[in-house]
Amino acid sequence: MNVNLKGIHFHCGSGQHGSSAFGKAVKLARKCMEIGRNYNHEMSLLDIGGGFPVGDLSKMTIDALKPTQHDHLGYRVIAEPGRHLSCRGFYLLTRILGKRMKSGKPCYHLNESLYHSFNCTLMDGVSF
């Protein structure tokens, strides 16, 4: 097909860094890079996705990435910076369309949704 693969990309998903799934994905991606090189693909880039937490990375994440540092395959490792670098980078303003009481607590209706700016409540367990 005359396609030269440049590398591998994976994304374990938010909240998976620090789990064994991330370490397994790094090892599997490296194996895929070896296979690609055996078929004469460039395989010079490993993109480890995003979803990294704000602040310090977990020891398990760092340990999973250590073997990539001096790997004889000589590829570059990149990541999507996301919230690790941009958390608290802005304030979200949204219109309150309505308010009601539900089980004794205020319930606000916004012109925003869980599938847009507030998807971190679904995907990351963030509570406002």
Image (cartoon, grey):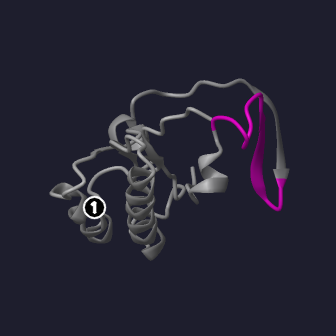
Viewer-proximal residue, 5 or 83?
5
**Furthest residue in direction bottom, as rendered:** 20
Work out whether 117 lies above or below 32: above
Residue at 39% across / 67% down in the picture? 27
Residue 7 position, x and y percent, is 42, 44
| Mark 1: few/some/many CA within 10 Å (<14, 14-19, 20+) | some
Viewer-proximal residue, 69 or 99?
69
Which residue is the site of mark 1? 65
Number of numbered discs: 1
| Residue 102 location, quadrant | bottom right
Work out whether 62 lies above or below 7: below
Residue at 38% across / 51% down in the picture? 37
Residue at 44% across / 27% down in the picture? 90
Residue 34 position, x and y percent, is 38, 59
Residue 65 position, x and y percent, is 28, 61
Q: Which element is circle 1 on?
A: helix
105 part of magenta stretch: yes
Span of residues in magenta: 102-117
| Residue 40 location, quadrant | top left
Q: Is residue 103 left or right of residue 30?
A: right
What is the three-letter code of the residue carrying label 1?
Answer: Leu
Residue at 73% across / 31% down in the picture? 112
Q: Is residue 28 left or right of residue 96?
A: left
